[in-house]
Image (tube, rainbow, N blue to C red):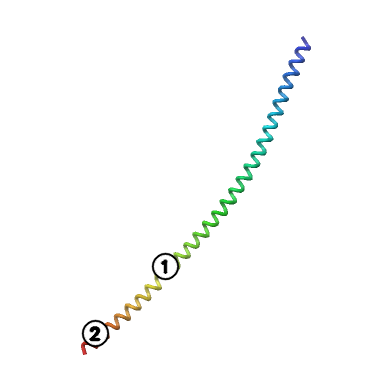
């Protein structure tokens, strides 16, 4: 019986060792996958930072353009005001000349 017990114990130990080896292999594969995922996340973050930088630059350009349009509109309004004033003076002079 001692031989049978010993055989059972050895068989059980061999199964446990095989199971541990399989788990060790799985753990190694999981580490490799985790490292790959970490690299992928780092790449996505870098791309996201680049996209964010592009969007921020676009926003700045749009704000500058909007300010330029405001300045142009104000300048045009001053020009129209000057023209209207000049036309008013011309009309006034023409009205005075026709009265004489």
What's the mark number on residue 70? Answer: 1
The one nearer the camera, 82 or 94, is 94
Depth check, mark 2 against mark 1: the one in front is 2
Is the residue marked by circle 1 packed among few (<14), some (14-19), or many (20+) residues within 10 Å? few
Check the image and report above or below for 14 versus 99. above
Is 89 positioned to the left or the right of 16 in the image? left
Where residue 62 appears, as percent x and y from the top left, is 47, 62
Q: Which mark is residue 95?
A: 2
Q: Residue at x 63, y 43 (%)?
A: 38
Q: Position of residue 81 (x, y in %)?
A: 34, 76
| Nearer-N-terminus badge (2/1) | 1
Q: Quadrant location of the N terminus?
A: top right
Q: Residue at x 37, y 75 (%)?
A: 78
Q: Residues within 10 Å of mark 2 (few under 14, many from 20)?
A: few
Q: Position of residue 86 (x, y in %)?
A: 32, 81
Mark 2 secondary-structure assignment = helix
Q: Quadrant of residue 73?
A: bottom left
Residue 36 is left or right of residue 8, and the answer is left
Single out the residue that lies furthest toward the right.
3
Which residue is rendered at x = 40% and y = 73% of the image?
75
Q: Position of residue 28 (x, y in %)?
A: 69, 35
The quarter in which the C terminus is drawn is bottom left
Drawn side of residue 92 relative to residue 80, left or right: left
- Local secondary structure at mark 1: helix
Q: Is residue 23 above or below residue 51?
A: above
Q: Residue at x 42, y 67 (%)?
A: 70
On residue 2, the disc is: none
Tally the marks. Answer: 2
Corner quadrant of residue 13:
top right
Inter-mark Cα distance, 2 to 1: 37 Å
Q: Is residue 47 above or below residue 89?
A: above
């Amino acid at each position: 019986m001692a031989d049978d017990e010993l055989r059972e114990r050895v068989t059980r130990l061999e199964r446990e060792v095989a199971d541990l080896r399989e788990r060790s292999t799985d753990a190694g594969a999981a580490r490799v996958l985790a490292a790959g995922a970490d690299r992928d996340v780092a790449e996505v973050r870098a791309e996201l930072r680049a996209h964010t930088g592009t969007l921020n630059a676009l926003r700045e350009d749009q704000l500058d353009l909007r300010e330029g349009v405001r300045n142009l509109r104000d300048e045009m309004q001053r020009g129209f005001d000057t023209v209207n004033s000049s036309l008013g003076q011309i009309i006034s002079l023409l009205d005075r000349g026709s009265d004489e």
